Amino acid sequence: MPSEKKQCEHYAKFCAALEKNENFQKFKAYAEKILGLGNNSLEKTIAIAVALCLVCAVLVSFAAVALKPLQVNNKELDMKKNILDVAGLLEAGSDIDAAFADKIESKIVDLETGDYVDSINAASYDQRKAAKDPAQSVAIPKDKDIAHIRVKAKYAKVFLVKEAGAIKSIILPINGYGLWSTLYGFLSVDADGQTVQSINFYDQAETPGLGGEVVNPNWRALWKGKKIYAETDQPSLEKGLITEADIGEPALSLIKGVVDSSKPGSQYQVDGLAGATLTSTGVTNLVRYWTSKEGFAPYLRKVRSVKGAKS
Ligand SMILES: Cc1cc2nc3c(=O)[nH]c(=O)nc-3n(C[C@H](O)[C@H](O)[C@H](O)COP(=O)(O)O)c2cc1C
Protein backbone atom coordinates (compact mmCIF):
# COMPACT_ATOMS: atom_id res chain seq x y z
CA MET A 1 0.00 0.00 0.00
CA PRO A 2 1.40 3.47 -0.88
CA SER A 3 0.72 4.97 2.59
CA GLU A 4 2.50 2.06 4.32
CA LYS A 5 5.49 2.55 2.00
CA LYS A 6 5.55 6.25 2.89
CA GLN A 7 5.46 5.39 6.61
CA CYS A 8 8.43 3.00 6.17
CA GLU A 9 10.34 5.73 4.33
CA HIS A 10 9.67 8.20 7.17
CA TYR A 11 10.78 5.62 9.73
CA ALA A 12 13.99 4.88 7.79
CA LYS A 13 14.73 8.62 7.52
CA PHE A 14 14.10 9.03 11.26
CA CYS A 15 16.49 6.13 12.11
CA ALA A 16 19.18 7.52 9.81
CA ALA A 17 18.89 10.96 11.46
CA LEU A 18 19.16 9.35 14.90
CA GLU A 19 22.25 7.40 13.90
CA LYS A 20 23.89 10.66 12.82
CA ASN A 21 22.98 12.45 16.05
CA GLU A 22 25.93 12.85 18.43
CA ASN A 23 23.83 12.77 21.62
CA PHE A 24 22.03 9.64 20.48
CA GLN A 25 25.38 7.96 19.87
CA LYS A 26 26.51 8.95 23.38
CA PHE A 27 23.23 7.59 24.83
CA LYS A 28 23.61 4.36 22.86
CA ALA A 29 27.16 3.88 24.07
CA TYR A 30 26.06 4.52 27.67
CA ALA A 31 23.15 2.06 27.35
CA GLU A 32 25.49 -0.60 25.97
CA LYS A 33 27.91 0.03 28.83
CA ILE A 34 25.11 -0.26 31.43
CA LEU A 35 23.68 -3.44 29.90
CA GLY A 36 27.19 -4.91 29.94
CA LEU A 37 27.49 -4.43 33.71
CA GLY A 38 26.75 -7.30 36.10
CA ASN A 39 23.32 -7.57 37.76
CA ASN A 40 24.84 -6.70 41.16
CA SER A 41 26.01 -3.31 39.90
CA LEU A 42 24.41 -0.34 41.73
CA GLU A 43 24.78 1.87 38.62
CA LYS A 44 22.87 -0.67 36.48
CA THR A 45 20.08 -1.00 39.10
CA ILE A 46 19.62 2.79 39.29
CA ALA A 47 19.79 3.28 35.50
CA ILE A 48 17.22 0.52 34.85
CA ALA A 49 14.91 1.93 37.57
CA VAL A 50 15.16 5.45 36.07
CA ALA A 51 14.52 4.11 32.55
CA LEU A 52 11.47 2.17 33.81
CA CYS A 53 10.09 5.30 35.53
CA LEU A 54 10.54 7.30 32.32
CA VAL A 55 8.74 4.68 30.22
CA CYS A 56 5.87 4.50 32.75
CA ALA A 57 5.60 8.31 32.90
CA VAL A 58 5.38 8.49 29.11
CA LEU A 59 2.74 5.73 29.05
CA VAL A 60 0.62 7.39 31.78
CA SER A 61 0.87 10.82 30.13
CA PHE A 62 -0.08 9.32 26.78
CA ALA A 63 -3.07 7.50 28.32
CA ALA A 64 -4.22 10.69 30.12
CA VAL A 65 -4.06 12.77 26.92
CA ALA A 66 -5.49 10.07 24.64
CA LEU A 67 -8.40 9.22 26.97
CA LYS A 68 -9.37 12.83 27.75
CA PRO A 69 -11.92 13.21 24.91
CA LEU A 70 -13.51 9.89 25.89
CA GLN A 71 -13.78 11.02 29.53
CA VAL A 72 -15.35 14.36 28.53
CA ASN A 73 -17.81 12.53 26.28
CA ASN A 74 -18.77 10.05 29.02
CA LYS A 75 -19.27 12.87 31.53
CA GLU A 76 -21.58 14.68 29.12
CA LEU A 77 -23.50 11.50 28.43
CA ASP A 78 -23.88 10.84 32.15
CA MET A 79 -25.26 14.36 32.70
CA LYS A 80 -27.77 13.89 29.88
CA LYS A 81 -28.79 10.58 31.46
CA ASN A 82 -29.41 12.32 34.82
CA ILE A 83 -31.47 15.03 33.15
CA LEU A 84 -33.59 12.50 31.25
CA ASP A 85 -33.99 10.56 34.50
CA VAL A 86 -35.32 13.52 36.49
CA ALA A 87 -37.54 14.39 33.53
CA GLY A 88 -39.02 10.87 33.72
CA LEU A 89 -37.86 10.18 30.17
CA LEU A 90 -35.08 7.67 30.75
CA GLU A 91 -35.83 4.38 29.03
CA ALA A 92 -33.61 1.32 29.41
CA GLY A 93 -31.53 0.68 26.30
CA SER A 94 -32.53 3.93 24.59
CA ASP A 95 -30.08 6.20 22.77
CA ILE A 96 -29.32 8.90 25.37
CA ASP A 97 -27.96 11.46 22.88
CA ALA A 98 -30.93 11.06 20.54
CA ALA A 99 -33.51 11.18 23.37
CA PHE A 100 -31.88 14.29 24.85
CA ALA A 101 -31.69 16.09 21.49
CA ASP A 102 -35.30 15.17 20.75
CA LYS A 103 -36.95 16.09 24.06
CA ILE A 104 -34.80 18.55 25.99
CA GLU A 105 -33.87 22.15 25.28
CA SER A 106 -31.07 23.80 27.29
CA LYS A 107 -31.48 27.48 28.15
CA ILE A 108 -29.47 30.01 30.13
CA VAL A 109 -31.29 32.03 32.77
CA ASP A 110 -30.14 35.26 34.42
CA LEU A 111 -30.84 34.44 38.08
CA GLU A 112 -31.31 38.07 39.07
CA THR A 113 -33.93 38.97 36.46
CA GLY A 114 -35.30 35.51 35.68
CA ASP A 115 -34.93 36.21 31.94
CA TYR A 116 -33.46 33.91 29.34
CA VAL A 117 -30.00 34.94 28.08
CA ASP A 118 -29.67 33.97 24.45
CA SER A 119 -26.20 35.49 24.00
CA ILE A 120 -24.60 32.60 25.93
CA ASN A 121 -24.25 29.25 24.19
CA ALA A 122 -26.22 26.90 26.43
CA ALA A 123 -24.63 23.77 24.93
CA SER A 124 -21.11 24.72 26.04
CA TYR A 125 -21.96 26.65 29.25
CA ASP A 126 -20.73 24.93 32.41
CA GLN A 127 -22.52 26.39 35.45
CA ARG A 128 -20.30 24.60 37.99
CA LYS A 129 -17.20 26.03 36.31
CA ALA A 130 -18.78 29.49 36.08
CA ALA A 131 -19.51 29.43 39.83
CA LYS A 132 -15.75 29.10 40.45
CA ASP A 133 -14.87 32.02 38.15
CA PRO A 134 -15.06 35.38 39.99
CA ALA A 135 -15.97 37.14 36.73
CA GLN A 136 -18.99 34.89 36.20
CA SER A 137 -20.16 34.45 39.78
CA VAL A 138 -21.39 36.40 42.78
CA ALA A 139 -20.66 35.91 46.47
CA ILE A 140 -23.74 35.02 48.50
CA PRO A 141 -24.24 37.14 51.63
CA LYS A 142 -23.77 34.98 54.73
CA ASP A 143 -27.29 35.55 56.07
CA LYS A 144 -28.78 34.36 52.76
CA ASP A 145 -26.45 31.42 52.21
CA ILE A 146 -28.71 28.76 53.73
CA ALA A 147 -27.38 26.16 51.25
CA HIS A 148 -23.80 26.86 52.43
CA ILE A 149 -22.35 27.23 48.94
CA ARG A 150 -20.73 30.69 49.36
CA VAL A 151 -20.87 31.58 45.64
CA LYS A 152 -23.24 31.09 42.74
CA ALA A 153 -22.93 31.58 38.98
CA LYS A 154 -24.78 34.65 37.70
CA TYR A 155 -26.33 32.53 34.99
CA ALA A 156 -27.91 29.13 35.46
CA LYS A 157 -28.46 26.42 32.90
CA VAL A 158 -32.01 25.09 32.93
CA PHE A 159 -33.53 22.34 30.79
CA LEU A 160 -36.97 22.58 29.22
CA VAL A 161 -38.88 19.40 28.57
CA LYS A 162 -41.09 19.97 25.56
CA GLU A 163 -44.21 18.23 24.40
CA ALA A 164 -45.89 19.32 21.17
CA GLY A 165 -43.96 22.60 21.30
CA ALA A 166 -45.18 23.53 24.79
CA ILE A 167 -43.13 23.36 27.98
CA LYS A 168 -44.14 20.27 29.97
CA SER A 169 -41.64 20.71 32.79
CA ILE A 170 -38.50 22.59 33.75
CA ILE A 171 -35.38 21.08 35.22
CA LEU A 172 -33.43 23.28 37.60
CA PRO A 173 -29.85 22.63 38.74
CA ILE A 174 -29.54 22.68 42.55
CA ASN A 175 -26.67 22.28 44.99
CA GLY A 176 -25.99 22.71 48.68
CA TYR A 177 -24.20 21.28 51.67
CA GLY A 178 -25.48 18.17 53.46
CA LEU A 179 -23.48 16.66 56.31
CA TRP A 180 -20.27 15.52 54.62
CA SER A 181 -20.50 16.91 51.14
CA THR A 182 -21.99 19.34 48.68
CA LEU A 183 -24.89 17.64 46.96
CA TYR A 184 -25.43 18.42 43.26
CA GLY A 185 -28.70 17.54 41.62
CA PHE A 186 -31.74 18.55 39.63
CA LEU A 187 -35.25 19.53 40.63
CA SER A 188 -37.89 18.95 38.01
CA VAL A 189 -40.83 21.35 38.23
CA ASP A 190 -44.12 21.39 36.35
CA ALA A 191 -44.80 24.18 33.83
CA ASP A 192 -46.92 25.78 36.61
CA GLY A 193 -43.63 26.69 38.36
CA GLN A 194 -45.09 25.31 41.58
CA THR A 195 -45.50 21.52 41.46
CA VAL A 196 -42.52 19.19 41.83
CA GLN A 197 -42.20 16.34 39.36
CA SER A 198 -38.99 14.76 40.62
CA ILE A 199 -35.61 15.32 42.22
CA ASN A 200 -32.28 13.57 41.78
CA PHE A 201 -28.76 13.96 43.13
CA TYR A 202 -26.01 12.91 40.76
CA ASP A 203 -23.01 13.95 42.85
CA GLN A 204 -22.87 13.61 46.65
CA ALA A 205 -20.79 11.90 49.30
CA GLU A 206 -23.22 11.40 52.20
CA THR A 207 -23.04 8.09 54.07
CA PRO A 208 -24.55 5.22 52.08
CA GLY A 209 -27.67 3.96 53.90
CA LEU A 210 -28.05 7.26 55.84
CA GLY A 211 -27.70 10.60 54.02
CA GLY A 212 -26.81 8.66 50.87
CA GLU A 213 -30.45 7.54 50.71
CA VAL A 214 -31.08 10.75 48.74
CA VAL A 215 -30.52 8.57 45.68
CA ASN A 216 -33.06 5.93 46.74
CA PRO A 217 -35.83 5.78 44.06
CA ASN A 218 -38.50 5.10 46.76
CA TRP A 219 -37.58 8.27 48.62
CA ARG A 220 -37.29 10.26 45.39
CA ALA A 221 -40.80 9.13 44.42
CA LEU A 222 -42.20 10.92 47.52
CA TRP A 223 -41.44 14.29 45.90
CA LYS A 224 -43.89 13.93 43.01
CA GLY A 225 -46.77 16.39 43.28
CA LYS A 226 -45.36 18.35 46.24
CA LYS A 227 -45.81 22.12 46.15
CA ILE A 228 -42.92 24.58 46.35
CA TYR A 229 -44.46 27.92 47.34
CA ALA A 230 -46.82 28.47 50.28
CA GLU A 231 -50.35 29.21 49.08
CA THR A 232 -51.28 30.22 52.64
CA ASP A 233 -49.02 30.98 55.60
CA GLN A 234 -47.44 27.78 56.89
CA PRO A 235 -46.82 27.57 60.63
CA SER A 236 -43.79 26.04 62.29
CA LEU A 237 -44.53 22.37 63.10
CA GLU A 238 -41.83 21.50 65.55
CA LYS A 239 -38.86 23.25 67.15
CA GLY A 240 -35.69 22.82 65.10
CA LEU A 241 -37.48 21.94 61.88
CA ILE A 242 -37.67 24.34 58.97
CA THR A 243 -41.34 24.13 58.11
CA GLU A 244 -42.75 27.62 58.48
CA ALA A 245 -43.17 29.85 55.44
CA ASP A 246 -45.05 33.03 54.65
CA ILE A 247 -47.46 33.04 51.76
CA GLY A 248 -45.59 33.04 48.44
CA GLU A 249 -42.32 31.95 50.05
CA PRO A 250 -40.63 28.56 49.50
CA ALA A 251 -42.31 26.12 51.89
CA LEU A 252 -41.08 22.69 50.80
CA SER A 253 -39.42 20.90 53.74
CA LEU A 254 -38.24 17.50 54.82
CA ILE A 255 -39.81 16.59 58.14
CA LYS A 256 -38.83 14.09 60.81
CA GLY A 257 -40.68 10.84 60.19
CA VAL A 258 -43.45 10.14 57.74
CA VAL A 259 -45.75 12.78 56.26
CA ASP A 260 -49.41 12.47 57.28
CA SER A 261 -51.16 13.34 54.04
CA SER A 262 -54.48 13.96 55.83
CA LYS A 263 -52.99 16.97 57.65
CA PRO A 264 -53.01 20.51 56.22
CA GLY A 265 -49.64 21.56 54.82
CA SER A 266 -48.65 18.00 53.86
CA GLN A 267 -48.40 19.13 50.23
CA TYR A 268 -45.23 21.02 51.28
CA GLN A 269 -43.70 18.11 53.21
CA VAL A 270 -41.49 15.15 52.30
CA ASP A 271 -40.43 12.31 54.65
CA GLY A 272 -37.04 12.99 56.23
CA LEU A 273 -34.26 10.44 55.75
CA ALA A 274 -34.17 8.01 58.69
CA GLY A 275 -31.09 8.53 60.89
CA ALA A 276 -29.92 11.38 58.67
CA THR A 277 -31.52 14.53 60.02
CA LEU A 278 -28.47 16.62 59.11
CA THR A 279 -28.53 15.61 55.44
CA SER A 280 -32.32 16.08 55.46
CA THR A 281 -31.92 19.62 56.79
CA GLY A 282 -29.27 20.24 54.12
CA VAL A 283 -31.70 19.08 51.40
CA THR A 284 -34.48 21.30 52.79
CA ASN A 285 -32.09 24.24 52.86
CA LEU A 286 -30.75 23.75 49.37
CA VAL A 287 -34.22 23.29 47.84
CA ARG A 288 -35.43 26.38 49.69
CA TYR A 289 -32.38 28.36 48.61
CA TRP A 290 -32.73 27.52 44.91
CA THR A 291 -36.48 28.22 44.90
CA SER A 292 -36.00 31.52 46.76
CA LYS A 293 -35.39 35.02 45.36
CA GLU A 294 -31.66 34.21 45.47
CA GLY A 295 -32.24 31.27 43.15
CA PHE A 296 -34.99 30.59 40.62
CA ALA A 297 -37.96 32.46 42.17
CA PRO A 298 -37.77 35.35 39.65
CA TYR A 299 -37.55 32.85 36.79
CA LEU A 300 -40.34 30.59 38.06
CA ARG A 301 -42.56 33.63 38.57
CA LYS A 302 -42.10 34.47 34.88
CA VAL A 303 -42.73 30.84 33.93
CA ARG A 304 -46.00 30.90 35.91
CA SER A 305 -47.11 34.07 34.15
CA VAL A 306 -46.69 32.43 30.71
CA LYS A 307 -47.75 28.92 31.73
CA GLY A 308 -47.82 26.57 28.78
CA ALA A 309 -46.46 29.24 26.43
CA LYS A 310 -44.03 28.19 23.77
CA SER A 311 -40.43 29.19 24.55
C1 LIG B 1 -20.42 6.96 60.59
C2 LIG B 1 -21.60 7.88 60.61
C3 LIG B 1 -22.08 8.40 59.43
C4 LIG B 1 -23.17 9.27 59.43
N1 LIG B 1 -23.63 9.78 58.26
C5 LIG B 1 -24.66 10.63 58.26
C6 LIG B 1 -25.14 11.21 57.05
O1 LIG B 1 -24.66 10.94 55.95
N2 LIG B 1 -26.15 12.10 57.15
C7 LIG B 1 -26.73 12.45 58.35
O2 LIG B 1 -27.61 13.29 58.35
N3 LIG B 1 -26.31 11.89 59.49
C8 LIG B 1 -25.31 10.99 59.48
N4 LIG B 1 -24.87 10.45 60.63
C9 LIG B 1 -25.65 10.71 61.85
C10 LIG B 1 -25.43 12.09 62.38
O3 LIG B 1 -24.22 12.12 63.04
C11 LIG B 1 -26.57 12.45 63.30
O4 LIG B 1 -26.56 11.57 64.39
C12 LIG B 1 -27.88 12.30 62.61
O5 LIG B 1 -27.92 13.15 61.50
C13 LIG B 1 -29.04 12.62 63.51
O6 LIG B 1 -30.19 12.18 62.82
P1 LIG B 1 -31.42 11.50 63.55
O7 LIG B 1 -31.92 12.53 64.50
O8 LIG B 1 -32.38 11.19 62.44
O9 LIG B 1 -30.89 10.27 64.21
C14 LIG B 1 -23.79 9.59 60.65
C15 LIG B 1 -23.30 9.07 61.85
C16 LIG B 1 -22.23 8.21 61.84
C17 LIG B 1 -21.73 7.66 63.14
Image (cartoon, rainbow, N blue to C red):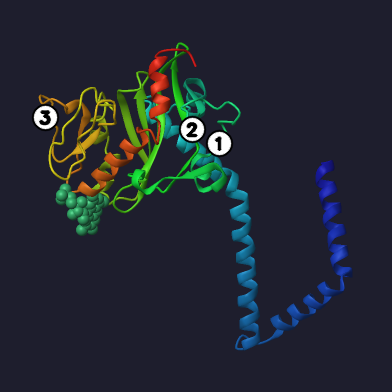
**Is residue 203 visible in the rendered structure shown here?**
no
Residue 255 against residue 150 in the figure, above or below: above
The residue carrying mark 1 has its beta carbon less than 8 Å from ligand 1: no
Q: Is residue 225 left or right of residue 119?
A: left
The residues bearing labels 3 and 2 have C-alpha atoms spaced at a distance of 35 Å
Q: Which mark is drawn over residue 125?
A: 1
User: For the N terminus, which image quadrant?
Assistant: top right
Q: Quick one: SS at disc 2?
A: strand
- Label 3 secondary element: loop
Sequence-earlier tag: 3 or 2: 2
For image coordinates 65% across by 83% down, the residue present is 44
Picture quadrant of residue 235: top left
Amino acid marked by disc 2: Lys
Give the image quarter of residue 71.
Answer: top right
Label 3 or label 1, whichever comes before in sequence order: 1
Q: Does residue 92 appear left or right of residue 31 in this picture?
A: left
155 in relation to 23, above or below: above
Return the disc, 1 or 2, that comes first in the chain's sequence.
Answer: 1
Identify the element where label 1 is drawn.
loop
Q: Which residue is mark 2?
A: 157
Mark 1: few/some/many CA within 10 Å (<14, 14-19, 20+): some
Whole-angstrom CA distance, mark 1 to mark 2, is 7 Å
Callout 2 environment at 10 Å: few (<14), some (14 to 19), or many (20+)?
many
The amino acid type, in three-letter code, at marker 3 is: Asp
State the image coordinates of residue 73 (x, y, percent, origin top left): 55, 39
Would residue 238 be found to the left or right of residue 150 on screen?
left
Mark 1 near mark 2, Cβ–Cβ under 8 Å? yes
Kind of residue at badge 1: Tyr
Depth check: give the residue in front, 201 or 281.
281
Residue at 46% x, 27% y: name it. Answer: 114
**Residue at x-position 64% and y-position 69%:** 54
